[in-house]
Image: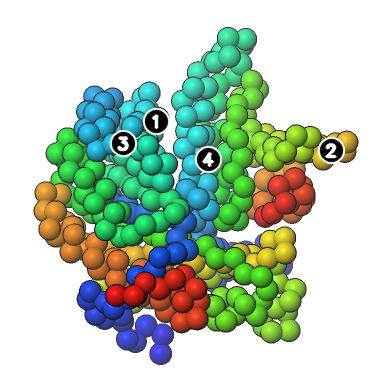
Amino acid sequence: MLGSKPLAWELPGSFPRLSRPPVVEATVVLSARPQRWDASLCGKLAEAVAKHGFEVTATPSDCSNPQEAADAPSLLAGTRDPRLVLRFGPQGMQLSHLAPYTDWGTLKTHLLAVWAPFATLAAPASIDRVEVRFVNRVYFGDLAELQRACPAACAIPAALLPAARCHASATELAVQEAEYSLRVLLDVRAEAERLRLLLMPEAGCSAQLPADDVEQLERVLERMRYLKNKAFFTWFSRQAIEQFAVEKP
Amino acid sequence: MIAQARLTPEFRLLEQTQQAMREAFAHSYTVGMQAVLDELEQVWQECRRKDWDGQGARPLTGRAKEAAIEFLKAFPPGTAAPEVGADPLGYFSFSWMPRPGWALSVAVTPQRELEYAVLLGSQRHCGRLPFYGELPPELAKWLEKVTGNV
C-alpha cells in the first residue's frame, strides 16, 4: 500500500562514487530569517564571504524588513569558479554548485564556510528548514535507451508512447522521521533527435535547528545526502549508473 | 461544463501538484528560470521609478513584475533563458536571440497580455495573446522555431 513503509535510514549508505555524475546543479537551501535585512547587513555579509572567495555580483539597492516583504531582494555572490552561486536573502541562504559537479564534500565545505558568517552577522533565531536539491540531466538517443536507464521515466500507455512529446511526474516518499521529506521530480522531453531526462530528488527537513549548532546541521545534511542518493540510485538502473563511471573503492 | 470541471477539488489538487513541480524546477539555475528571475529583480530595481530612461519612461510597477514572474514560471523546465529588458511603456520584455536574424521578443503587460514579435530570417510575425498563466501554444511554437527546443 502507498506510504505504508517509510524510508528507513541506512546511514551512511553504501552508494558508489561516480566520476561522471550527471548532476547539472546541486543546491542547498537553509531557511533562516535574519533578525533584520538591510543594506548594512548586506555590506557586512559581502565583506565576510569575500574571505572565502565569493564576490558579490548583485546587491539590493533597497532592503526591506523581512517580516514585511517575503520576496525582498537578495544578495548574489559568485566565485572565480563560475560553478558556485551564493544567495543571501531575507528568508535565509542558498548555495548552488553547477556542472561539472565534483562531490558532496566540496559542496558541504563551501556551505558551512559561508553559513558561519551568515549565522553570526544575520543572527537568525534558528534554521527552520533545510533543503537539498540535485538536478540530474541525461540525454538518450532513443526511447529504448531511456527505458533501460530509467524504467520509471516512461509511465505512459505503450500505445501512445511514440506520440508523447513530454512527461512529468512528482513522487513524494514517506521518511521514517516525519520532519524529513523526499520528493522526486522527473521530466522527460523530446528534443531534436534525442530525449532529455531531468531527475530532481528534493530532500527536506523541517525540524527547527539552533543556528549556532553546526554539528547538528551537519547531521541533518548527511541525512539529506542519504535521501537524495537513495532516490538517484533507485530511479536509475544499474546499467545506467555504470555509465556514470563508478569509481572503485 | 469546462468551467464546472475546473472547480472540482480533484482538478484543483492536480493543478496544485503541477504548480508545485513548476515552482521546484523554476528554483534551479540551470534548468529553471532562477537566473532570469534574479535578472528580472535587478531590472525592476533599476526601472521602478518614473523616467528611468531620462526620456519620460513609465515605471515598472509591482503588478508588471508579478505578471512577468508568472509568465516566466509558465515555461517548461529547460527552456532557453531569455534576456530581460524594460519597455518605456512600463512592461517587462523578454528576448531570445540564438543567432543573428532569429529572434523572439515578448512584452508582458501588467494587464496580462503578451505582445510578441518574431524574426525568422526574412520572415516576420507579430501578435498579441492573452495570458492566463499557461504558455500559449502559439508562443511555444514560435519559441521552438527560434531556439530549436521547448
Name the chain letter of the residue that bears numbered label 4.
B
Q: Is residue A91 above or below residue A231?
A: above
Name the residue tied to disc 1. Answer: A57
Cα distance in 3D space between marks 2 and 1: 36 Å
Q: Residues within 10 Å of mark 3 (few under 14, many from 20)?
A: many
Name the residue at 75% across, 45% down.
B146
Q: Is residue A217 above or below residue B72?
A: below
Depth check, front residue: A220 or A105: A105
Cα distance in 3D space between marks 3 and 4: 21 Å
Badge 2 marks a residue whose secondary structure is loop
Name the residue tied to disc 2. Answer: B121
Estimate the x, y position of residue A198 in percent, counting from the top left: 53, 64
| Earlier sequence position, callout 4 versus callout 2 | 4
Comparing labels 4 and 2, the label whose residue is closer to the camera:
2
Cα distance in 3D space between marks 2 and 3: 42 Å
Q: Is residue A66 visible?
A: no
The colour scheme of the drawn protein is rainbow
Discs 3 and 4 carry the same chain letter: no
Depth check, front residue: A167 or A36: A167
